[in-house]
Image: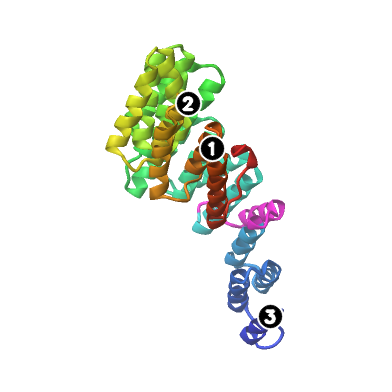
Amino acid sequence: MGWLTRAFGGDARAPRDVDAALRGALLATLSRDWEQAEHLLISACRLDSRAVEPYLALARLLRSRGEIGRAIRIHQNLLLRLESDSAEGRRALAGLAADFHEGGFLRRAIAAYEDVLAGESKHEPALRALAQLHAEAREFERAIEMERRLAKLEGRAPGPAEAVLRVQMAEAAQAEGRSDVARRALRQALRRDKRCAPAWLLLGAVEAERDRPKAALAAWKRVPEFDPQAGASVYPQLEATFATLGKARDFEVFLRKRLEGAPGDAVARVALARHLGARGDLEEALGELRRVLSRDPDDREARICLGRLLLAGNRDSEAVKEYAELLDALDRRGPALDLEEVE
């Protein structure tokens, strides 16, 4: 802590004035010395009890460390002596709202942020927080209102963010068995953003639940178009639905058409390989997987699928080689692999 001694000229734990204490607290924070940062901020508060900044900084530090109760008390004490319609009063109120949010006090957080907006209707952090909080409270229309106001302030189109909120609304309705409400919310989401892959994915599930396989198929077919990675979660449903409709071969047609337009879509190519392998076209399936691996030797899903197909074809020595390559790929990428994925 020699730098503190030099900064304060003597005892590192005895700053001369508020500015020195705040500078020291900043340096301590950058060094992740939270205990020293807290000590210096407390010193700043004692040096000038009328100053607001040290209290706000101390409360934020405490909140970041999970000491929500202490942060709340600081903000509440500040609010007792600040004018609620002053800039400092609104900052303290916004800090209190953030404390409540972090502490899981949903209703109290909403009420505090609403009070912030009452004094400053264009308070962006409050609008952003309220959009999230109202969604957590399943008050989606209110969340959408906040999102629209926020988008206007930020000069952006509200459609994509609003679509996400309407998907959340649909998820909540579906969980409660209100499929009609869920379907309506999803249609509204897609009117706001037709490229919203989660909306298409959930719409397919809703239509399938309503025993409308053709409508489900139409919705699920849009998912890879807008989010290729989400294809992994939708291709099994597509394959099963094509089979239900007596059009099992059309799944392969769909995948090949997809790959014509997006030859680099590894997720679709792995799905095609699995489909081909399941019906016994082993060599063709292996060829598709090797095309993926020629582009990305570290593609985990392709390696796993290749190993499984080789084992199913009694080509154990080749499978062992592929799983060795998989382990090398995992070493290069870092994340651990659940062994259940390769069993």
Q: Say which residue label 2 marks.
A: 278
Q: Amino acid at mark 2?
A: Ala
Q: Secondary structure at mark 2?
A: helix
Disc 3, SS: loop
Q: Name which of mark 3 and mark 2 comes first in the sequence.
A: 3
Q: Secondary structure at mark 1?
A: loop
Label pair 3/2, CB-CB below 8 angstroms: no
User: What residue is disc 1 on?
Assistant: 315
Eyeballing the image, is 120 above or below 203? below
Residue pointed to by mark 3? 1
* Label located before the other in sequence (1 or 3): 3
Foreground pick, 206 / 32: 206
Tell me the kind of residue under disc 1. Arg
- Tell me where residue 319 sits by quadrant: top right
Residue 67 belongs to magenta span: yes
The one of 342 and 194 positioned closer to us in this rendering: 342
What is the span of residues highlighted in magenta in the rendered image?
A: 63-85
